[in-house]
Amino acid sequence: RGWGSSSSAQELLPTASDCFGGAWMASAVGDQSALRRRKAAEDEAAQAEASRQRRVQEVDVAEDEGEALTEADQEYVEYFRKKYGDNPRTDFLGIDGAGLFCVIYIVVAGVILSILYFSVYARNRNVFFSESKPFSV
């Protein structure tokens, strides 16, 4: 077998044994990556199916306990699970729990105290800026 011993296009190309003396081993790298992608897609599909089955079982348990979900409620449940996942985030601006409570408490207290201050200021503006007694040191 040589480089130009035949007129066929297949025969014109060198083989692995021609280039590397027969010591070259074929590697299916492309096949491996395609196999990994296919396996990842199958695993993802299996995980989604398991998640769906778990949700269906949770709904069945809820119905058995007397908390029957209507079709509209079930539609809302499926929508929010699809949009936010099984464990929706409960934080706001990256803060949750006690930190979120403190922020809300400070904001609400600030608004209430500001309303009180401005209502007193609106009734007695001259108390804050009295011109009868100049300030002296």
Image (cartoon, rainbow, N blue to C red):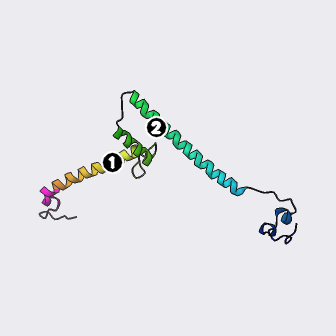
Q: Nearer the viewer, mark 2 or mark 1?
A: 2
Q: Is residue 50 left or right of residue 78?
A: right
Residue drawn at x 12%, y 56% is 123
Circle nearer the N terminus (2, 1): 2
Residue drawn at x 16%, y 54% is 119
Give coordinates of residue 131: x percent, y percent: 13, 64
On screen, residue 31 above or below 77 = below
Cα distance, mark 2 to mark 1? 33 Å
Check disc 2 and give the amino acid type: Arg
**Disc sitting over residue 104 in the figure:** 1
Crowding near the residue tagged with mark 2, few <14, some 14–19, many ≥20 C-alpha atoms within 10 Å? some
Q: Quadrant of residue 63?
A: top left
Check disc 1 and give the amino acid type: Ile
Q: Is residue 135 left or right of residue 3?
A: left
Crowding near the residue tagged with mark 1, few <14, some 14–19, many ≥20 C-alpha atoms within 10 Å? few
The quarter of the image holding the N terminus is bottom right
Q: Nearer the viewer, residue 107 or 16?
A: 16
- Please check the rendered image and state whether residue 30 is part of the magenta-colored stretch, yes or no: no
On screen, residue 45 above or below 13 = above
Query: Pointer 2: what residue?
Result: 55
Please report the bounds of the magenta region as a residue range: 121-131
Q: Secondary structure at mark 2?
A: helix
